[in-house]
């Protein structure tokens, strides 16, 4: 499950909007809003990588946002 609050916070911290991130990632803004609203469960790896690159996420930030759960 994606930590959507942390993702939104990082978007704001970077001075971007969800619309701009959607444009960078190459998806419609409605699609990005829908995926975020669904807890990010439907993000593809390609989309996650594109978002991480657009936001300049470190590997720790990437893991904290997109892999916000413990694996047994």
Image (spheres, grey):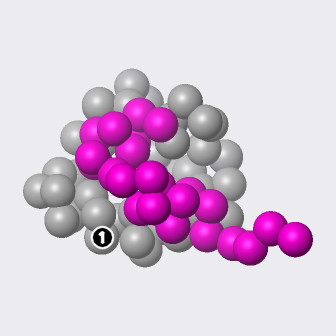
Q: Is residue 52 visible?
A: yes
User: In the figure, is residue 44 to the left or right of 5?
Assistant: right
- Left or right, 48 with reference to 15: right
Q: Residue furthest right?
A: 72
Q: Is 64 rendered above or below residue 16?
A: below
Asked if residue 45 is positioned above or below residue 5 in the image, the reply reads above
In the rendered image, residue 57 lying in the magenta stretch gets the answer yes
Question: 10 Å neighbourhood of mark 1: few (<14), some, or many (≥20)?
Answer: few
> Above or below — where is 70 with respect to 49?
below
Q: Secondary structure at mark 1?
A: helix
Q: Residue at x 74, y 73 (%)?
A: 70
Query: How many numbered marks appear?
Result: 1
Which residue is label 1 attached to? 9
The x and y percentages for residue 66 are 56, 57
Q: Is residue 54 magenta?
A: yes
Q: Is residue 10 above or below residue 43?
A: below
Residue 37 in sight in this render? no
Name the spot of residue 23 as percent of width and height, x first: 29, 31
Q: Quadrant of the C terminus?
A: bottom right
Q: Quarter of the image containing the N terminus?
A: bottom right
Identity of the residue drawn at 46% across and 45% down: 32
Residue found at x 28% / y 48%: 55
Residue found at the very far left of the displayed protein: 15
Q: Which residues are magenta?
A: 49-72
Residue 52 lies left or right of residue 42; in this view the side is left
- In this rendered view, identify the residue nearer to me: 64 or 41: 64
Res. 10 image quadrant: bottom left
Secondary structure of the magenta portion, mostly? helix
Q: Position of residue 53 (x, y in %)?
A: 34, 38
Q: Residue at x 39, y 44 (%)?
A: 52
């Amino acid at each position: 499950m994606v930590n959507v609050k942390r993702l939104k916070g990082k978007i704001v911290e970077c001075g971007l909007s969800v619309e701009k991130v959607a444009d960078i990632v190459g998806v419609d803004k409605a699609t990005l809003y829908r995926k975020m609203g669904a807890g990010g469960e439907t993000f593809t790896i390609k989309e996650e990588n594109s978002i991480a690159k657009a936001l300049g996420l470190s590997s720790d930030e990437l893991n904290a946002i997109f892999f916000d759960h413990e694996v047994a």
